[in-house]
Structure formats: C-alpha cells, structure tokens
Image (cartoon, rainbow, N blue to C red):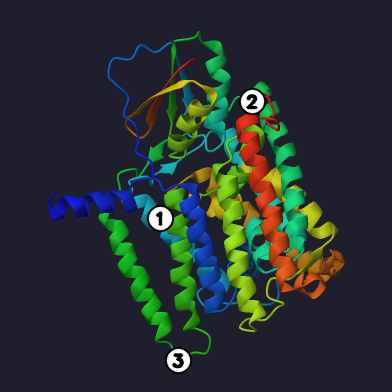
Amino acid sequence: MKLTEKFAEVHNAFFKKTWSPMTGGILLAFLAILMVIWQRPWGIVGGLRNWADWFFYLIGLYGEAPKHALYYSSSVMDLGLLAGAWISAVIAKEFAFRMPPMLEIWKGAIAGIFMGLGATLAFGCNVGGFYCAIQNLSASGFTMMIGLILGVIVGLKYIYWEMEHLMPGPAGPTFLDKLPPFLGYVAVIGLIVAAYLYAGSSVEGVPLMAGYLLIGAGIGFVFHRSRLCMVNGFREPFMTGEAAMGKAVAVSIILGTIGIGLLKFGGLRETELYVEAAFGWGSLVGGFIFGTAMVVAGGCGSGSLWRVAEGQIKLWVVILTFALSNSIFRHYFGEWGIMEKLGYAVYMPDHMGYGGTIILVMISMALWYLVIDWNEETSKFVMEM
Amino acid sequence: MSDNKKAPDGLSVAMTLDAKGLSCPMPLLRTKKEIEKIKSGEILEVLGTDPGSRNDIPGWCSRSGHEYLGEKEDSGFIRFYVKKK
C-alpha cells in the first residue's frame, strides 16, 4: 500500500466513517475532564441563555446588559461546539439545511419551551444538570436522571400517539448540501487563529476563552463523528431496545467522575463547581419536563446543538425557543425567589467521602449499563407501538 | 466505525415511505410502522434526509431480524432499503 493510500484510509476513518458511540463517550469524558482542568466544567444552557439574555436586553425587557457573548465561557464553549460539529459535518459531506414538515417545526418550538423550563428547574440541561453534575459529584445529577427517565417514557408515549393520529405533511427543501469539504479545513484554521487571538489578549480572563473554544470544538467534533446522543441513550432502551448510546453515556460518566473527582479531591478545583441547589424537586421535576420535551424535540441540550451545526432546521427552532424560554424562566424565577426553593446543594463527598462517592457513581452507572444491556437482549422494557 | 452499505441496483420495491425532513427518532419509528404493511420477503424503501438514519435503520434491522439491503444517495436525500423477514 502506498503512503498516499494509507493517508486516504486514515483520513476516511477519522473524518468520514461514523465512530462508535463508545469511542465518542470515552473521548467526551476526556474532554469534559480537560475542560475542568482548563478552568471550569463544560455546559450548554448557560451559553444559550446568554444569547437570549442579549435579545431580551436589546428589546428593553431586561435592564442589565449580559456578559459579552465572545468573552463569556459558556457562550464560547457553545460556539466551539457548533464550530467543531460543523467542521465534522462539512468534511464528511453530511451538512445540509433540511427543512422539516410543519408539524415538526411546531413540535420543536413547543418542546424547546419546555426544555427551557426543565433546565431552569434542574439548574442545567442534560449536560449541566445530569452528565456534568454527576461527574462533579453533585447529588442533583442522580435526581435529574430519575426525572429524565420518567420523562422519556412520557415523551415516547406522546410520539407513539402522534404516530397513530397525526401525519407530518410534506417536508420542505434541502439546500446547501454540496458545500465543499475544504471549507471544514478552512474553519479549523479559523478556530486556531481565533484561539491565538484570545490567548494573546491582555484583558483579564480573555485568554481562557482560547481553551473553551478549542475544547468546545473538540466536543462538537466528537459528538458529530460518533453521533453520540443522550436522548438516544435514554430513549432507545424503551423504544427499540438498542443500548449502545446508553452504555457509552454510562461509561463516559464513570470516566469523567474519576477524573474530575480526583481534581476536586486534590484541591485543584473548588468543590462547589457545578453543585447546584437542585437536589430535590427542582432536578426531579425539571428532569421530568426536560426528558419529556427532549424526546419530542429529537435532541437534548448537546444533541440539539450539534444537529444545528448539521443544518437540521427543526433543531434550530428547538434551540431558539429553548434559549428564549430558559432566559425568561431563569430571569423571572430569580426575581420571584423560586430559584432558592428548588432544592439543596448536596456535594456527595461531604456525606460519604470521595471513595464512597466514586464507588456509588460506578455502581449506579454499572447497574444502568447492565440493565439496558440485558434489556437489549430481552426487550423487557421496550414499549410497543 | 461503520461504512455505509450500498444497495444493489434493480431492487423491486413493494412500498416507499417518505421520511424526508424528519429527524431522529421519527424516520425509524415510521419505518417500524410501515414495514408491518408489507409481506415477508418484500422490500420497503425509505426516503430520508437525516444522516442519523444511516446508523438507526441498519441497527434496528440487525436486532429485529429484517435484512438491511443498503442505501443509495439521491439528490438531497438518501434511499434506504429494508427486506422484511
């Protein structure tokens, strides 16, 4: 085999073939740990809310200007995720604007509103409220997980009902589906230039944006290459029995918990990072609402965002209403004092030590892995249409 | 890592499902529903625009026992072929 042929083979494996969910899950854990090493945990909804806050500020609803979207960590992470997923989609020739039927647009709009409410109550979406919350040793991650599972069952029941009673109607056009792959490599150069510009800034805090951007882009790239999807991980055990995504998420959480747990144990990061006062009804009810809505939306916080970068217009609508509603709910719930009544901040090592907490996470995720793997063979939990 | 299996030419299709514009999980759910309407050995053609269907439909076929025959690229969408068990 010539060297050029080997290059083409490796390029194809890296940029064009779909990676396994487990590859995605392991790499996602690595990047989530890297984000904490850099400065703070990874998140999705904070950045979306920042963009919506700007909208409400500019139309005069909010009195105080939000943080600058290009100098705010959560926003830059999301921009990085979008860029990384877009690069992956364009190089793999999977980018296209895909206009859905009208029913799907309405579903996306309504589901996004409820996702915004759920993420407000749980102090985060499936990423900040569940995935990263558990990795950061917050008990609220577990209560949100229970809420998410219950919500997914209700969301699936709705989808089944819809299958029998509603027709989606004709789809709109697909366009810009032939973008040349070299644009993806141009975007990689653009990302590197932007990171250098951030890193070279003398303004306090701005050089940190370089890491948020690049690690965020890595997360977006990994998500799109592996099509890792947390909705899928929760939904498929009940819909088809498929467990690959769920198992990847479980392993990813274990790996991330070990890494971030050690950083906190060693005093390298503040223990209160991502330990929100949501352990209680906030994360449970928020998880339930978010879980129901994400099934109808066809994407969670992370899954919707990387599908935006792939050009799926339904998920553009989801992200739009998700961001706007989260901003509104967070703003007014804060003003009305509701955010202080959602639950308690429970840092699990305070109650069972670091060893006990990591063992608890490993056992609970291993149990989830075991149950959905068994269900994949037996279909015990699969809900028939 | 997975390759996209190419469908052979000249397949005789019993039914076509238009799932263009639908995103996950609707193309797979509609496929599950429509395949009930054809006979064993017949072929269902699914038209879709969601790249995720490239994983979802073959994965579902391998679990449910239906034969995934492959896909064909068309102008702005993909044609998937499933032979009912």
Have a look at marks 1 and 3 and say if they share a chain. Answer: yes
Q: Which mark is residue A202?
A: 3
Residue A319 appears in the picture as rendered: no
- Near mark 2 (Cα within 10 A), the count class, few <14, some 14-19 or many ≥20, is some
Q: Position of residue B16 (x, y in %)?
A: 45, 17
Name the residue that disc number 2 marks.
A163
CB within 8 Å, label 1 to label 3? no
Q: CA distance from mark 2 to mark 3?
A: 56 Å
How would you rate the neighbour count of disc 3 (Cα within 10 Å): few for under 14, some for 14-19, many for 20 or more?
Answer: few
Q: Could you tell me how far apart the alpha carbons at marks 1 and 3 are, in whole angstroms? A: 30 Å
- Label 3: chain? A
Instruction: Tell me the chain of label 1.
Output: A
Please tell me whether mark 3 sits on a helix, a strand or a loop: loop
Q: Are marks 2 and 3 on the same chain?
A: yes
Task: Give the residue pinned by disc 1.
Answer: A86
Q: Amino acid at mark 3?
A: Ser
Q: Amino acid at mark 2?
A: Met
Q: Is residue A106 above or below residue A197?
A: above
Type of amino acid under label 1: Trp
